[in-house]
Image: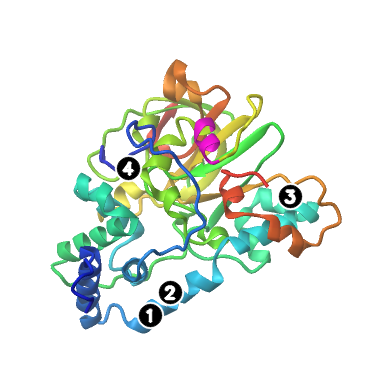
Amino acid sequence: MSPPHEKVDPRAVRTEALETLLTEQGLVSPDAIDAILRHYEQDVGPMNGARVVARAWTDPAYRERLLADGYSAISELGFGGPQGEQLVVVENTPTVNNIVVCTLCSCYPWPVLGLPPSWYKDPSYRSRLVREPRKVLGEFGLEVPEEVELRVWDSSAEIRYMVLPERPAGTEGESEPALAARVSRDAMIGVARL
Amino acid sequence: MDGIHDLGGRHGFGASLETRDEAGFHAAWESRVFAMASLLMGRGCFNTDEFRHAIERLDPVAYLADGYYGRWLGAAELLVREAGGRPTPGRIADRTAKRRLDSDPRFAVGDRVVTRNLHRAGHCRLPAYARARRGVVEMLQGGWVLPDSNAHGKGECPEHVYCVRFDGRELWGDDAEPGTSVCLDVFDGYLERG
């Protein structure tokens, strides 16, 4: 019961009602709910994608496998699961930058990036990225030169996309963990450079 | 469906964007909605396509006002209501919607294609901004469950999916940002030879 001066979110009330109904029918349980949430807190997240990127930067054969069949390649590092069963990794180059969106809902490569941030799922990003990607990236603080082609990937089916960012200059000789620490979620969506 | 969810290219949602490093769930109810919907789908009470289409069928004002997990909540409530308050577990969801097809793909990489002018009343994964537009096949993605039928209890009816690239000017006209393109995963039935 919340204190009387706090406004109760009707969605919280509706959620509780739904959970009561579904629990009574044996369709959900607190343990099952907690197990799912633990998985998405601990086992999946951008740290997975960062390790994939660091491996691709340091191991050319792995990079080739990653670009040919993303899901098999991430499986080598122990990553997998829902919303990534076919994963296409698109590499940024000096002449082509890639950015990922789902205009119709929120499709996102969970196994390597975890659950998407709010801005990825909001009408503003979903409506604007396909139409004015250069302007949108500018608002994210990323100025892309005119001569760089921008390729937007709209995840309209079950194939999921992740960007392989360019390796920053001056990182030769760094270990994989050190390189992975450099890789941000936003760079793997394509809205940031490293 | 020509619904509110089909946001690609729409004007009016132009809030300036910024990325925030944020927790996935902003309130406990959000996490519980996520987990409950996942459990119901995992138990086959409804499939992913039915769930996405339920989100699309929400009242447009609620769609925009309730936020991302508010939409999940609304969709779960809608599907539970449509099941008479007693969702029925069904076939356990497959790990993947990918299917082997006996037929060969109609198109090859590099083929020119044009999307059909589809205005289906039900679930369809061709965004409005990409209807009746010319593109080039970029990748063959294999066979996949067709959302248009799977969302309506009409069976999987799998089709070949093609990643098709559309030039920015083809989509947005002369005012398109130069040097941009959009790649979409398009079902076979959405396409004609270009």
**Residue contact at pointers 1 and 2, CB within 8 angstroms:** yes
Q: Which residue corresponds to mark 3?
A: A64
Q: Which residue corresponds to mark 2?
A: A36
- Magenta stretch secondary structure, dominant: helix
Q: Which residue corresponds to mark 4?
A: B124
Disc 1 crowd rating (10 Å Cα; few below 14, some 14-19, many 20+) is some
Dots 2 and 4 on the same chain? no
- Start-end of magenta stretch: A134-140
Can residue B101 be seen at all in this image of the molecule? no
Kindly identify which chain the residue marked by label 2 belongs to.
A
The residue that appears at 33% across and 59% down in the rendered structure is: B69
Nearer the observer, A7 or A193:
A7
Nearer the observer, B34 or B49:
B34
**Residue contact at pointers 2 and 3, CB within 8 angstroms:** no
Mark 3 and mark 1: span between their CA atoms?
Answer: 39 Å
Q: Mark 2 or mark 4, which is nearer to you?
A: 2
Position of residue A6 in the picture relative to residue A129 (left or right):
left
Q: Which residue corresponds to mark 1?
A: A32
Position of residue B111 in the picture relative to residue A66 (left or right):
left
Position of residue A15 in the picture relative to residue A109 (left or right):
left
Q: Position of residue B157 (x, y in %)?
A: 36, 50
